[in-house]
Amino acid sequence: MKSDKTKDEELPAIPEIDKVIHEPARLDIMAYLFVVDSADFLFLQRQTGLTWGNLSSHISKLETAGYVEVKKEFLDKKPHTTLQLTNKGRTAFEKYRQSMIQIFNKLPKHMRQHH
């Protein structure tokens, strides 16, 4: 049987990817928060299309990782939740973004044909 090149020879090493951010819903949340100073819960819910429960669950994971700060207050006797990236979250998102750019830049421009 003909020996093929190993995977290491064909593709460059893939940088470590932050799995907390990489999940699509959390990536959406992080991306929105990256470009604003802060956002309220309802804004993020409308932008992401997530249900209240799903958004709340993902925000909890981001908060546990230290990436998001959650501020809860009352405005006109109604609960109001504001979110913003922490410095750690901003740094982690930038690192994630750079890792993804590296991955895509290292891929070949065209698919190779198998014979």
Image (cartoon, grey):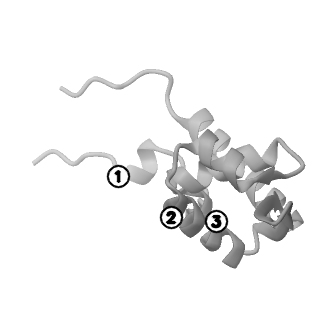
Residue at the limit of the structure toward the front, as seen here: 77
Q: Amino acid at mark 1?
A: Thr
Who's the residue at 70% across and 45% down the image? 43
Q: Quadrant of residue 77?
A: bottom right
Q: CA distance from mark 2 to mark 1?
A: 44 Å
Q: Which mark is residue 87?
A: none
Q: Quadrant of residue 56?
A: bottom right
Q: Earlier in the sequence, mark 2 or mark 1?
A: 1
- Counting from the top left corner in percent of width and height, residue 37 is at 90, 49
- Counting from the top left corner in percent of width and height, residue 90 is at 82, 57
- Report helix, strand or loop for mark 1: loop
Numbered disc in front, either 2 or 1: 2
- Counting from the top left corner in percent of width and height, residue 9 is at 44, 47
Q: Identify residue for label 1.
A: 6
Q: Identify residue for label 3.
A: 59
Who's the residue at 80% across and 60% down the image? 82
Relative to 56, 109 lies left or right: left
- Report helix, strand or loop for mark 2: helix
